[in-house]
Amino acid sequence: MKRNEGIIPEPLEKAIDQLATRAMAAKADDVIVLGSILEHLETIEKMSRENGYPAGGALIQAVRKLVEKIVLGEAHDPPKALVLLGRGVHLIQGKILHPDVSQPTQEETAFWEALVSLIPEEKPSLSPKKKTRVGEPGGPAAGKPQETVTDFGQDMDLCKDFVSEALERLETIELQIINLEQSPDDKECIHSIFRSFHTIKGVSGFLNLKEITQFSHAMESLLDEARNGRLQIQEEIIDFILEAVDVLKTMILELKEQMKSGRIQPPSIDLSPYLRKIERMKRGEAVFPTAIAGKSEVPPLGEILSQKGIISAEDIEGALRIQREEKKDRKIGEILIRENKVKPREVIAALRDQKKSSPQPGETAVRVDTNKLDSLVDLIEELVIAQSLVAQNPIFSSLHDPKLSHDFSQFRRITTDLRRISLSLRMVPIRHTFQKMIRLVRDLAKKSNKEVDLILSGDNTEIDRNLVETLYDPLVHMIRNSVDHGIEPPAKRSEAGKPQRGNIFLRAFHKGGYIVIEVEDDGQGLNRPKILKKAREKGLVPEDAPLTDHQIDNLIFEPGFSTAAQITDVSGRGVGMDVVRKTIEKLKGNVEIFSVTGKGCRFILRVPLTLAIMDGIVVQIGKERYIIPTVFIRETLRPCPTDLKTVQNRGELIKVRDTFLPLIRLSQTLGIQPQQEQPWEALVVVVENEGRQQGLLVDDLLGKQEVVIKNLGEHLKNVEGVAGATILGDGRVGLILDIHGIFEMNLHSPMSAQA
């Protein structure tokens, strides 16, 4: 393509050539190439407008609409649409090459007629003829906004993917904003945020979600000003970007709800105030020099070598000329080396710099329905159980065939690997949940006029996918309490000899078969006198009941308990810590509190790594077998007759390390005839729940085992003291004990209540 008297900028010429190449290679089912065409159209429209070539604007919009229809499968005749696409690209080239031609050519008129006949429902928006204005006959009524209703029909799956991807992109923006606040001049961070808005805009444009497209495009243009150095990132802009993320998130969640009916309506949010604010920001800060339009985010190899002073601009032009005219298949680096312009070491260094600047490819991933994944895991667990049943079959054990033993060992190894891989499919890093807390702390600190830093560690720790979202609410409640109740105002911290900025530590790590999450702050700690006074006022504890510090601390988990002087949007409603305890208990875990007055408070959450598998100790009571989760077990022992004390009307006590603990006879609780009546002939398992320790009397310990948790079904799900069931290696069913439920069943014992 020849330049028009040498005035067309090279980047614009290059973009048009690339568009023409993509159009020639386009196929109706090749979404990647069609998406690339859309990106080139957008680039050409922007560059032509900035360089004074607006003549092709209407054509570009029409071709873009045509491509969108092809992508969505709405073009009635795809082969004809692809031919029309090529004609449209050719017309765009002509419009930019000859901007002085104001009247439509015969070819252009034919293009418009063919386009309207191919997509008749788009005639008002595609036709370049006179437009009907608001208030005119045939146009929308003045002062009444048009409300369109989109019927997605066959595109519902595409819309679902958009919602999922858009929400992920918005989370990415929130995380990048935190980095941008610390380093406002970080161009790569700005680029990353820009690309996220750009992706949302592009996909929403495919789906004809006009409001989302309009708003994300406006945010993209604002960030483009910052990318090109015309807008300085300040605190107000960062706050506005976060506000914009919330607006987009609201619109996308509305879309998600509307998808259930299959008919998408415009969002309820009025975007005009936000759009006006964006324009004001752009006008108010547009004092910086304009950067070169169309500059690639990934610098060419020649540009990198030139910036380093290794070669001159003339050397680059010469190499490019050789590449175009003589050896088109040779790379620019190879040409420069053969021409003795650079050394191989210098080209390698420049390539490494170029790689650092280029966007890294994401991990290859396949979207799989979670129900299918759960079914796969369940089937593999059934396979493991079936293998165990075969291995323990007496007939199989009596066979002494070496080949059979070898084959079965290989089968066992494959089954073990299958189980490990299937469980890893459910495991995801807790990073996303942790990083959501960064913005939460920032917003809460701002509302409370406090200075708080959130310090994360162990965010790469993996956890069952089903646990990730469940843990979000408990973490939010604890973080809120740490900011509102724990961290003191800056002035008060200074008086106490502390730094004005408070710290909240959020940690995660594996321990045994559990994940441990710690939320710790360096604030004032729990106010025990205030907690005890409030608990007595509410009648939670008797006036004269002596309570230990640990028992006082655990009062904050009581329903409706709060020490806040007034209810705010941060805390004070008394529903937070109660939710935390109930949620963790449902996950077969527990919560512990450690507080030091004036030093801070630490909450420790222990939950199983996965809801499918649990570590437990298999115990025998009578002829039955039960599993006690290891997270609750502190120790096991065989007591001496002198260690047992019986208090009239107050139950039995067992001495453990100079402390008397209530003794629960599980045989009586579960209604089973035990093999051993006397505790010194049986075993005691010391368990702990919510700071209370008790001894569980069992006949025998059969060993530690990793068990697959099975639900008891609808009819038995509310059985007290039982959390689930599992199939043991010999095929028998073993019930998993609910320690919290066991404690509740024995609350009638005064000794149990005091322990």
Image: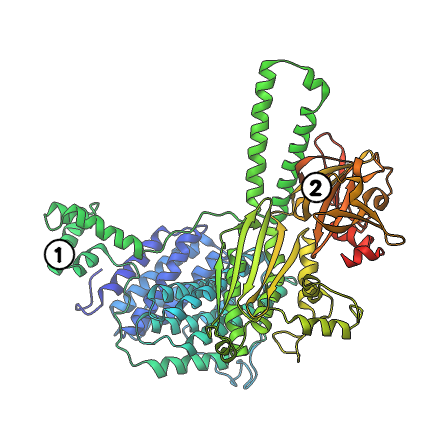
- As drawn, 607 above or below 171: above
Secondary structure beneath dot 1 equals: loop
Above or below, comparing residue 301 to residue 416 in the picture: below
Residue 145, percent across and down?
A: 55, 80
- Badge 1 crowding class, 10 Å Cα cut-off, few under 14, some 14 to 19, many 20 or more, is some
Q: Horizontal placement of 641 versus 458: left or right? A: right
Q: Residue at x 62, y 47 (%)?
A: 610
Which residue is at the front of the view, 101 or 37?
37
Q: Nearer the viewer, residue 721 or 106?
A: 721
Q: Which residue is label 2 attached to? A: 636
Q: Residue beneath label 1, please?
A: 311
Q: Residue at x 32, y 58 (%)?
A: 19
Instruction: Report whether 706 appears left or right of 74.
Output: right
**x and y percent of residue 74 in the render?**
51, 58
Q: Earlier in the sequence, mark 2 or mark 1?
A: 1
Q: Amino acid at mark 1?
A: Ile
Query: Which element is circle 2 on?
Result: strand
Mark 2 vs mark 1: in front = 2
Count of marks, rendered view: 2
In the rendered image, residue 317, in percent from the top left (x then y), is placed at 14, 57
Q: Position of residue 105 (x, y in %)?
A: 32, 69
Between 690 and 437, the one lying in front of the other is 690
Any part of residue 150 in sight: no
Image quadrant where residue 425 sits: top right
- In this view of the protein, can residue 302 be seen by the observer? yes
* Between 370 and 392, the one nearer to me in the picture: 392
**Measuring 70% from the left and 51% from the top, which residue is drawn there?**
688
Task: State the quadrant of the C terminus.
Answer: bottom right
